[in-house]
DNA sequence: GTCAATTAATTCATTCAATGAATTAATTGA
DNA sequence: TCAATTAATTCATTGAATGAATTAATTGAC
């Protein structure tokens, strides 16, 4: 039997309320004290106290004026302090990237480098570590509060390592989290890439909401899902929930290396799409795609209304939609956001997915379901992992107070 | 955008802590104050205060002595007060039943009556209402705190009515909840029957735990799942999450009335099992089951090691297991509990399900997964719906205080 | 038997987070 | 210019958990 939940004492109340105010500031970039009071249900005097502390710690800044209809204008409060930063790392199959983000989630990719499958895990790991250290050093004027890393594939949380990472033999035995934690001096958080993408959509996406269920579908070389329920990632016991790519849609389908038969991935991953396009091209040796059957080329052809390619994209979208019907019937979510490589196929994909879902679920369920494409200008996974670090670090606002106090002391020591 | 979460004030702290103590008392039937203190993380003096109030309200009783290794013995605190009761109703396809339960979840079925598909919803509803009123009246020495009702099939929570109840035409337009609430004078809660079963397993089953994910699979004429995450039911937006019977395992399978193709239900519901047994019997006209192919007869034959029937049960179990692999890959649960009619098939079913799951998921996932049969002496759905009412009512312990005060006043008035 | 050690439960003054009520501040519109 | 309205602050008050001391009950060593 797992551990019980804990009771709440006055210290906890303060921490929870402050964390709540921070969450609201993250969702609503600019907020007045009055709005925070009404959103939290706390009294204005309480909010005044909280914001005063936050100002003192340099956690928030007063930023502009919010005009109302009548009465005194309110002062905008915003999280995007210049002082605190977080670092996000994305470890992908063919590259890694590193970004620097502020507490509001704004920031950019700073470094992106290709990863070579042959270089082996320890060398690759050193390169990533050096890149992160470089970014941390570059941010020396700021305080880097933590580092997050998004990793692909089934990732067993409790064991602190990747379970199965087919493209990188050897990596599954590297206790990534611990090594990073030992090297850097800040907290390190690891997360499945689909979960990271889901967090980005939840916090910063256009379909952002306060409660409910959002499923972010990372449809790329594999199909993974990040599940956010009332703002919290649902990870399952071992952290491998959301492996919808290994949901079967054909019980006597081809065997997958996961052990299952007829896995959804087999029908609608980008790999499947490329495979099917290639197959279809056999009958059309004169087709221009025979020269270049990379994914971008396929999507270009689809965008140019090439009927052969459009048909294959539609087929993949049909399977994806069909698999998502299973997801809808089990989770009954508010929103499904489709991201990653396959989402590049755009409206052609989305419309087919929507039609397939509509024609396979009860009308009442479809009416209450939003299905959208992810629409981030930059990599949502990298943004999401930054978001994750912000979330983790700001769950205990008191730690920021300690940091601020240390900074104060140092400043005073230099003066004296 | 849905409503935000609320901040916590001191009143909330008290309510949350008291509700926590009650939850722990529900899980651990007999507890000392010291144990409650260590489980909640609250101080002993706090627990003393809380328990004193509970004693005053007749919510708990001191019951026996718990011996330790050394030192003073502790006083057992237990929820099973004689004063407060809840009523549970199960509306099934062919019958309804009513039970009376105390706060610890103990109790029995009081009434079970057959329902006739032809009698029509309004007459059936009157009969149910009268039965509940009878049970409430019979419990007159106690206080009935609320009534819960478990209903079959997709049940759209927000609309307060059943969405699709194939066996009972007309019922889908009855706003069950409101009618019950108007008739009786106590709070009424409606719940999907699979969810009710899941609650019974979570609170009172042998696989009971404090945190984690439990999936209760109600495998009967349909296949539904109740999903409990960290003690809370996961219901999805409309309350229809867990419809795993309408998860497809064959994309070009037969069309289901839900709109999907190849729904799991079609392969392993009790209806499917009966259908397949009948089919198999065609080649064996001398087989005794030809006389009586009801479900109990089928299970008796299976228990008597009839090879034909065993084979059909194994087939159904294989499909169920296969479908549950999809559930495992999406939820990564701690425990799957299989209940309802199909579970009567016993170990034959369970072993095949386990083998199927084991051979279709990654070994690491299987190692951390418990798969069990539901093992309640009485109907877990009815028990679960009682549990639900207890949970709902005791979420606000202060209401009990009000009740106790009212009782006190009445008693004093009679004295004076 | 007796007494130290140990664990359970209670008592009551203390702490501190949110709060209520009054106040100050800023804005619109008549 | 002033009433009405909304925003934010101030400071004494409330009441929840708590700390420290105390009472209570039990074991085991001597």
Image: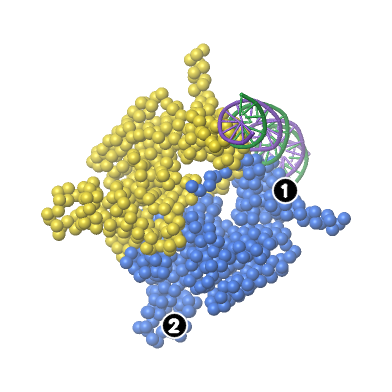
Chain colours: A blue, B yellow, C green, D purple
Q: Residue at x 38, y 27 (%)?
A: B139
Foreground tag (1 vs 2): 1
Image position of B341 with respect to B367: above or below:
above
Image position of B12 with respect to B317: above or below:
above
Location of residue A366 by image quarter: bottom left
Image position of A102 with respect to B230: above or below:
below
Is circle 1 on the same chain as circle 2? yes
Q: Residue at x 68, y 68 (%)?
A: A133
Q: What is the count of numbered marks?
A: 2
State the separation of the CA atoms marked 1 and 2: 61 Å
Q: Is residue B363 visible?
A: yes
Reading the chain from its start, which is encountered first: label 1 or label 2?
1
In-front residue for pair B265/A64: B265
Residue corresponding to mark 2: A289
The picture places residue A79, in percent across and down from the top left corner, at 67, 55
How many neighbours does mark 2 have within 10 angstroms: few (below 14), some (14-19), or many (20 or more)? some
Q: Residue at x 24, y 40 (%)?
A: B116
In-front residue for pair A169/D10: A169
Q: Which chain letter matches label 1?
A: A
The picture places residue A45, in percent across and down from the top left corner, at 69, 41
Q: Residue at x 39, y 66 (%)?
A: A259
Direction from residue A365 to residue C5 in the image, left or right: right
Image position of A93 with respect to B7: above or below:
below
Location of residue A403 by image quarter: bottom right
Residue corresponding to mark 1: A53
Most extreme residue toward the top, as rendered?
B416
């Amino acid at each position: 039997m797992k551990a019980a939940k804990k009771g709440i004492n006055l210290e906890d109340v303060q921490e929870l309320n402050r964390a709540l105010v921070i969450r609201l500031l993250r969702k609503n970039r600019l907020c007045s004290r009055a709005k925070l009071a009404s959103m939290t249900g706390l009294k204005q005097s309480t909010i005044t106290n909280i914001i005063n502390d936050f100002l003192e710690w340099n956690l928030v800044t007063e930023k502009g004026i919010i005009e109302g209809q009548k009465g005194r204008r309110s002062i905008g409060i915003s999280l995007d302090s210049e002082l605190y930063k977080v670092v996000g790392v994305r470890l992908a199959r063919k590259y890694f990237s590193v970004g620097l983000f502020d507490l509001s989630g704004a920031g950019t990719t700073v470094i992106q480098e290709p990863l070579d499958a042959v270089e082996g895990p320890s060398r690759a790991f050193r390169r990533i570590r050096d890149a992160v250290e470089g970014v941390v050093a570059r941010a020396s004027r700021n305080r880097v509060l933590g580092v997050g890393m998004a990793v692909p594939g089934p990732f067993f949380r409790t064991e602190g390592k990747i379970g199965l990472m087919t493209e990188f033999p050897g990596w599954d035995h590297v206790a990534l989290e611990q090594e990073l934690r030992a090297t850097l001096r800040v907290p390190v958080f690891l997360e499945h890439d689909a979960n990271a993408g889901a967090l980005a959509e939840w916090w910063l996406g256009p379909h952002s909401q306060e409660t409910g269920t959002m499923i972010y579908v990372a449809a790329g070389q594999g199909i993974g899902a990040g599940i956010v329920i009332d703002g919290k990632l649902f990870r399952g016991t071992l952290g491998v929930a959301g492996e919808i790519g290994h949901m079967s849609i054909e019980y006597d389908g081809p065997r997958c290396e996961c052990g299952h038969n007829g896995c959804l991935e087999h029908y609608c991953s980008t790999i499947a799409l490329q495979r099917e396009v290639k197959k279809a091209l056999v009958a059309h040796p004169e087709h221009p795609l025979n020269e270049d059957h990379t994914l971008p080329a396929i999507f270009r052809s689809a965008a140019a209304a090439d009927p052969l390619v459009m048909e294959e994209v539609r087929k993949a979208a049909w399977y994806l939609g069909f698999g998502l019907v299973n997801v809808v019937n089990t989770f009954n979510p508010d929103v499904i956001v489709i991201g990653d490589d396959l989402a590049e196929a755009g409206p052609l994909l989305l419309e087919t997915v929507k039609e397939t879902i509509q024609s396979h679920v009860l009308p009442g369920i479809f009416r209450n379901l939003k299905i959208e494409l992810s629409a981030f200008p930059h990599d949502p996974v990298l943004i999401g992992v930054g978001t994750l670090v912000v979330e983790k670090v700001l769950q205990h606002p008191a730690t920021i107070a300690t940091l601020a106090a240390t900074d104060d002391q140092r400043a005073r020591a230099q003066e004296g």
